Image (cartoon, helix red, strand yellow):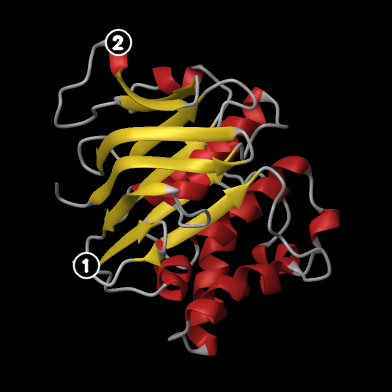
Amino acid sequence: MTWGVQVRAATVGWGDFVLQVGGLTLDANAISGRLPVLGRSGSGKSTLMYLLTFLKRPREGWVRWNFPDGSQAVWGPKGLDASSTLSLTDIRRRCFGFAYQSSTLTPYLRVRENLRYPLEQRGGYSDAEMDRKVHAAMDRVLLRDKNGARIEETTPEEFLERYPNQLSGGQFQRVALAQAMIHDPYVLFADEPTGNLDSETRREVMSLVDRWLTVGDRMVIWVTHHQSDALDPRVNHWLMVANNRCHLRLKGGGKLSETHSEQG
């Protein structure tokens, strides 16, 4: 495996609900950097994300992330294993980005301040570097046509001074995704980031992710209720969560090789 995540004999949940992930190996290159997660409401898709992002400890088993820079993190019932070379803070500030249907944008902060926040948390950037990254992100967020000309009349500087409640639904989600990606994480986790949007706006929002994936070693894992996401020609695997289990599927409905997934 070049880089990616492995899960072995993990169970996670609370109360009477327990999700089982018997065995799973996700190589970032093998899955083309894109992995949708599908399943019915209440099946455990978000629970799986909590496990993969180290937000919920497994009752048993473990999760191991190997990152492109050679660092690794192992997550088990007691938290981070001693073999991990990163702290939880490092993982969440440097390696992971998070985008949700109910966004993490802070309502009393302007767009500029919301975008700067992950950079300030990660550290290592000067004010000038943060300003450059914020303006670059904002330029990507403002819609353009197929020839690259900006569609929206708003300039990046004007847009940066807005508050979240002054944005349209599509603008809000594009800014939320920009916030999740601005610190250059290896993995973007998105939980129904476009669930409330119409199909055209949804394509506009996800185009930000497409552009983000073209730079460096990156992967996006996103929960979706759109079956069309699994049919995207750029997607060759997807995760199906059903009956308290997680299954890795191949494009076309084929069975997986044992090197990719063995479900207990």
Residue 201 left/right relative to 178: right
Q: Viewer-proximal residue, 37 or 215? A: 37
What's the residue at 68%, 68% (across, down)? 114
**Residue type indicated by callout 2:** Gly
The residue sitting at the top extreme is: 253
**Alpha-carbon span between mark 1 and mark 2:** 33 Å
Q: Viewer-proximal residue, 31 or 78? A: 78
Q: Quadrant of residue 205?
A: top right
Q: Mark 2 Cα within 10 Å, few/some/many (few <14, many 20+)?
A: few
Q: Viewer-proximal residue, 242 or 134? A: 242
Residue ID for mark 2:
252
Report if residue 252 is visible in the image: yes
Above or below, 176 against 242 in this view is: below
The x and y percentages for residue 230 are: 42, 21
For the C terminus, which image quadrant?
A: top left
Q: Secondary structure at mark 2?
A: helix
Report if residue 207 is visible in the image: no
Q: Quadrant of residue 85?
A: bottom left
Residue ID for mark 1:
69
Q: Secondary structure at mark 1?
A: loop
What's the residue at 50%, 71% (across, down)? 133
Q: Viewer-proximal residue, 237 or 199? A: 237
**Residue type indicated by callout 1:** Asp
What's the residue at 49%, 18% (across, down)? 228
The x and y percentages for residue 186 are: 35, 58
Which mark, residue 5?
none
Above or below, 160 against 19 in this view is: below
Label located before the other in sequence (1 or 2): 1
Residue 172 left/right relative to 139: right
